[in-house]
Amino acid sequence: MDISHRAKRIKPFYVMELLEKAKELEKQGEDIIHMEIGEPDFATPELVKEAAIKAIKDNRTFYTHSLGLPELREKISEFYFNNDGINVSPDKIIITEGTSGAFFLLFATLIERGKILGIPDPGYPCYKNFGHLVDAQILPIQVSEETKFEVTKDLLGAVKESPDLLVISSPSNPTGRVYAHDTILNLWDFLREKKSNLIVDEIYSGLYYKGKIKSSLSLSDEIIAVNGFSKTYAMTGWRLGWVVVPQELVRPIQKIAQNLFISPPTISQYAAIKAFDAVEELEEMRKTYRKRKDFLIPELKRLGFNIFVEPEGAFYIYAGIERWGIDSMEFVERGLLEAKVALTPGYDFGLFKAGSHIRFSYTNSLENLKKGCERLGKWLKVLTSEKK
């Protein structure tokens, strides 16, 4: 059977493969500390679960409007007004099958064969793979400690061909970096002159540790903002996201959504209406993540990891492993087998410095994070002795 060129270009998602290996080891009786997967370890808030149960009992199990429940779109509009003081019309909000569904719909609408998709390197790997599915040319923009792992206007100006579409995330995966609004505005000004589009992935915006982040929509209603319920609201398995787009994009996206998905998951939508009301539970999650971050950063530095830019949001730490002189893929494979700690190699996020960096996720209890660091400390002494 011949395989399409698009499928051949899709790279493995290493973090998922490592998670599966870790699960196999656990089936064999091994105790694995998970610091690889970016999935909240908290239960979905009770209000959300109760709303889902009520929806089932009330037989709300049929297709909804292809753009999503009007009630949910209204609730998201209220969210932007209450949190950011901006008016976002519900008519510009599209409910999607997770943020992955949002990106696929956006890419299928905005780019095609020959168009250029700009993505940060390192950055979230699925951006590139969605780009491959629509035959876009991929332009990795190398971000480093010098730019605080941000795409800047200067970096865009230095590339030979400007992207037709640029995607950034703030807070970002894998670094946890939060873009200043001035930086986003400069990017938007540059792209607008080129008649290009900007998407800001704001899925981690509720997990910021220095107060609140205003949505990029406060800068311009022509910027496209993607968000969802998976991370901040601990609803990964509910597969629900949303995107805010300029009005002229709503109908083109809707036509594709009708064919691909018919409608977003009905029960998840009714449940998500209550997600914004779970204020106390959401704040408790955020405080807990911050405590974990505040423990982990100095501890990893003590163990010898290089952390050049400390995260301000999300639940990740991007760390350099240069001192041990081995490739990140070997590092995480051996770390899993020898230290019984699951980590993510830099190769999941691009190629720039991928061999010298790994990602830690602190979506695990403080007790387990401490245990994981103890195991890594013992194992790293072995690695250090091998170099002598």
Image (cartoon, grey):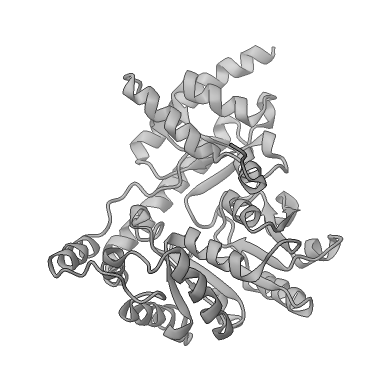
The percent position of residue 73, horizontal first and vertical second, equals 38, 79
Compare residues 251 and 285 and report the one nearer the observer.
251
Q: How many marks?
A: 0
Q: Split into 4 quadrants, where in the image is the N terminus?
A: top right
Query: Within the image, what quadrant is residue 107 found in?
Result: bottom right
Asked if residue 381 lies left or right of residue 21, the reply is right
Asked if residue 381 lies left or right of residue 291, the reply is right
Compare residues 379 and 276 and report the one nearer the observer.
276
Q: Is residue 386 above or below residue 303?
A: above
Q: Split into 4 quadrants, where in the image is the C terminus?
A: top right
Query: Within the image, what quadrant is residue 49 found in?
Result: bottom left
The percent position of residue 349, horizontal first and vertical second, equals 62, 45
Residue occupying image coordinates x 72% and y 61%: 113
Q: Is residue 151 visible?
A: no
The percent position of residue 44, horizontal first and vertical second, equals 28, 56
Query: Within the image, what quadrant is residue 130 found in?
Result: bottom right
The percent position of residue 196, horizontal first and vertical second, equals 72, 74
Q: Residue furthest left?
A: 57
Q: Is residue 333 above or below residue 36?
A: above
Q: Is residue 48 visible?
A: yes
Residue occupying image coordinates x 45% and y 24%: 375
Compare residues 129 and 386 and report the one nearer the observer.
129
Residue occupying image coordinates x 68% and y 15%: 387
Q: Residue furthest front?
A: 1
Q: Is residue 243 above or below residue 331?
A: below
